């Protein structure tokens, strides 16, 4: 990402472009014993990201937002070069945020710092999108990155686990915030934090926030929504509607197979609608997985009497844009608030 001096100098929020400078700032927060919330992003901020930042402002004395488009989580054929980069707009959105604590003795809170590292700093041994060509240290969470999204994007979670481990090591957050839209990512990272015995954050300090959606049609907010044509955007909410319909079927006692089939049938109707408007809709996957192991539920499995949670998720292409979404069926709080 190209960063101009004017982009940074006009920002009232401190922007740190090197690890060294950020750590000097973080050391002062340690000395002051202040809590630090952290929201990692790839930029192109929208209301979904901002909901995470707002939550951090409520729960922490200081809030750090990182903006880094991570090459390691893009396969060679994916959209690294075209991924939206909107730094001036991102900084303006962050500068507009403010939280006023209930106590009249507390001052208002705004984002405290933006961490904007270079690829060279984050990957000192260099980085290639081709895993076979990569050198240096990488992190994998074995057995949890091959299902769901990992089936379609086999190197994705390796890249995510690596960069977030680096960011946690640099930022040293008390709390970190992730959106439910990327539920597998968030749960995988919570396991990583526990497996590696990280202290900043601990597993209980990694918070999963419900997916932010369009208030009218329920489409999950995503930076990639900007890729959608007007006709594709009009049809995209059929994805979430199909998951909602499947959730209702599951709640009646239907099997996993019947539940997934209902969603697929709804998307088949959407596909027919799309053809009438010149929009190609293609289902990558719709599946139900155990929320702890990510293993696929058996075809005949039904909702358990104790409301044990499961993840109904999927990925659907609208034209050239791949969207993901999910709903936690059963006791969602057992997953989100663990």
Image (spheres, helix red, strand yellow):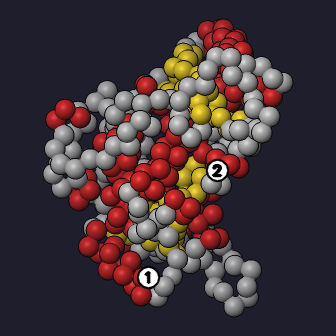
Q: Which residue is mark 1?
A: 29
Outermost residue toward the right?
252
Q: Which residue is mark 2?
A: 336
| Residue 332 seen | yes
Q: Is residue 201 left or right of residue 49?
A: left
Q: CA distance from mark 2 to mark 1?
A: 28 Å
Instruction: Give the secondary structure at mark 1.
Output: helix
Residue at image x 52%, y 59%? 203
Q: Is residue 49 above or below residue 251?
A: below
Query: For residue 308, which quarter of the picture?
Result: top right
Residue at image x 52%, y 47%? 186
x, y (%) of residue 28? Answer: 39, 85
Query: For residue 82, which quarter of the picture?
Result: top left
| Residue 323 seen | no
Q: Nearer the viewer, residue 329 or 7?
A: 329
Q: Is residue 160 left or right of residue 300?
A: left
Residue at image x 42%, y 87%? 31
Outermost residue toward the front?
305
Q: Nearer the viewer, residue 77 or 179?
A: 179
x, y (%) of residue 81? Answer: 32, 38
Residue 149, disc: none
């Amino acid at each position: 990402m190209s960063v101009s001096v004017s982009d940074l100098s006009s920002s009232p929020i401190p922007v740190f472009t090197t690890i060294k400078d950020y750590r000097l700032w973080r050391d002062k927060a340690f000395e002051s014993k202040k809590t630090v919330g952290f929201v990692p992003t790839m930029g192109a901020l929208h209301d979904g990201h901002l909901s995470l930042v707002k939550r951090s402002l409520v729960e922490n004395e200081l809030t750090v937002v990182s903006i880094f488009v991570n090459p390691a989580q893009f396969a060679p054929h994916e959209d690294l070069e075209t991924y939206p980069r909107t730094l001036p707009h991102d900084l303006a959105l962050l500068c507009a945020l403010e939280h006023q604590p209930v106590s009249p003795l507390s001052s208002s809170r705004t984002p405290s710092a933006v961490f904007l590292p270079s690829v060279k700093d984050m990957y000192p041994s260099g980085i290639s999108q081709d895993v076979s060509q990569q050198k240096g240290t990488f992190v994998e969470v074995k057995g949890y990155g091959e299902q769901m999204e990992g089936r379609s994007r086999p190197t994705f979670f390796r890249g995510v686990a690596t960069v977030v481990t680096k960011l946690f090591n640099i930022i040293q957050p008390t709390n970190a915030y992730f959106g439910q839209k990327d539920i597998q990512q968030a749960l995988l990272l919570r396991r990583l934090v526990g497996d590696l015995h990280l202290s900043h954050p601990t597993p209980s300090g990694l918070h999963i926030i419900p997916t932010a959606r369009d208030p009218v049609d329920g489409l999950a907010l995503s930076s990639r929504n900007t890729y959608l044509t007007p006709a594709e955007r009009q049809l995209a909410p059929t994805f979430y509607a199909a998951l909602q319909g499947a959730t209702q079927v599951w709640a009646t006692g239907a099997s996993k197979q019947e539940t997934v089939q209902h969603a697929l049938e709804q998307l088949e109707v959407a596909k027919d609608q799309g053809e009438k408007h010149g929009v190609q809709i293609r289902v990558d996957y719709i599946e139900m997985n155990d929320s702890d192991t990510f293993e696929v539920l058996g075809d005949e499995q039904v909702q358990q009497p104790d409301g044990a949670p499961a993840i109904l998720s999927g990925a659907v292409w609208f034209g050239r844009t791949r969207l993901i979404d999910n709903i936690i069926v059963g006791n969602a709080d057992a997953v989100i608030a663990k």
